[in-house]
Image (spheres, rainbow, N blue to C red):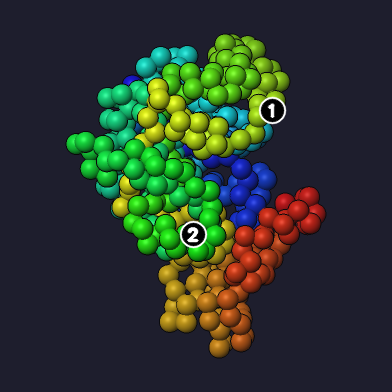
Amino acid sequence: MRYATILAGGSGTRLWPLSRGAQPKQSLPILNGKSLLQVAFDRIVGLVPTEQQFVCTGEAHRKVVRESIPHLTDEQILGEPEGRDTVNAVGLIAAVLARQDPEAIFAVLTADHLIEPLDEFQQKLDMGFQLVEDDPTHLVTFSIRPTRPATGYGYVERGEAIADMPDAYFVGQFIEKPDEVHARQYLDSGNFGWNSGMFVFAARTVIDALRRYMPDTHEGLMQIADAWGTSDQAAVMQRVYPTLEKISVDYALLEPASNDDSLQVCTILMNVNWLDVGCWASFGETLPPDTDGNRTNARLVSLDCRNIIGISDDPNHTIATVGCEDLIIVCTTDATLVLDAAQSQRVKDIVAMVDERIR
């Protein structure tokens, strides 16, 4: 049976001061009144029944998630006591689903991306389910056709094409975030895609692979699975989950699987417009520019300014700028952030310096 889980961990510190510890970026209504999480669930309408949709998030954000996605029950929210990177989120999903459905096949999707067009996304996700349904040893990743030599994303090399599956390939190699020279080479070759962080797996295949590659993690996840749905669930989760090795699914599962003859790592190329809304610079791309490249969700009054991004939690707030270029300004009732647009990835560093009460 098909399932889908949206990963919505983390607090999104690079979108501070709008995003806070109690109000993570995925739940902010910043996309024409919708949150990134709501948009992520909208993308899977018609592909997976609502009762087979899940979200994996921080336990502290359970209430916020329920308010954002009211059709989810408590059982459909997998709450992590703390973030332990993606392999443990994926392992937790696999362990929980396999307990109730040994034949479960699940998609792992993201809560901080904008993807268009919808029909291309859904077609390729359906293809991913088909690949795993045809052969549970397939571990399916989704790669995005690159449009520039980006250095902030990982890359996936496409190997041999999979018969009768257009845009489906066996993976040649995974490459972590490259420098600009190598990123340009990957773009020019035409054989690489951006690693989207989205997957389709058979639950039992993930569990068996973790047993071989990460036996301690497997043992911990099995303890959690055994307690799932019982009165001991919360206590076991709180005791065991924080002890699991913190590592990504790419390093812990997909890379060793690439050298395992019993598994087949595949990638499906998505021809979509893909935006990772991970910082204010990328969020600015969701807003229409004026003739000088200035963008805002509030009232921006600019004199001799270019490429200003002005953000406020109050649409009636006025931001006025004079003689500025390439600035990002974010205003809330208790904090204002001003930064060079090229430094948008450093917001998390300044957040660590501000008073804990407004983090």
Looking at the image, which is closer to me, 303 or 92? Answer: 92
Residue type beneath disc 1: Pro
Horizontal and vertical percent position of residue 322: 62, 85
- Can residue 228 be seen at all in this image of the molecule? no
Q: Residue at x 40, y 54 (%)?
A: 274
Residue neighbourhood size for the residue with mark 1, other residues' Cα within 10 Å, grouped as few (<14), some (14–19), many (≥20): some
Up the image or down, 256 lies above or below 180; here it is above
Horizontal and vertical percent position of residue 288: 42, 70
- Residues at marks 1 and 2 touching, judged by CB atoms closer than 8 Å: no
Which residue position holds label 2? 182
Residue type beneath disc 2: His
Q: Residue at x 58, y 23 (%)?
A: 214
Up the image or down, 167 lies above or below 303; here it is above
Which residue position holds label 1? 242
* Residue that lies at the very extreme toward the left in this rendered image: 164
Q: Residue at x 55, y 88 (%)?
A: 304
Q: CA distance from mark 1 to mark 2?
A: 36 Å
How many numbered tags mark residues here? 2
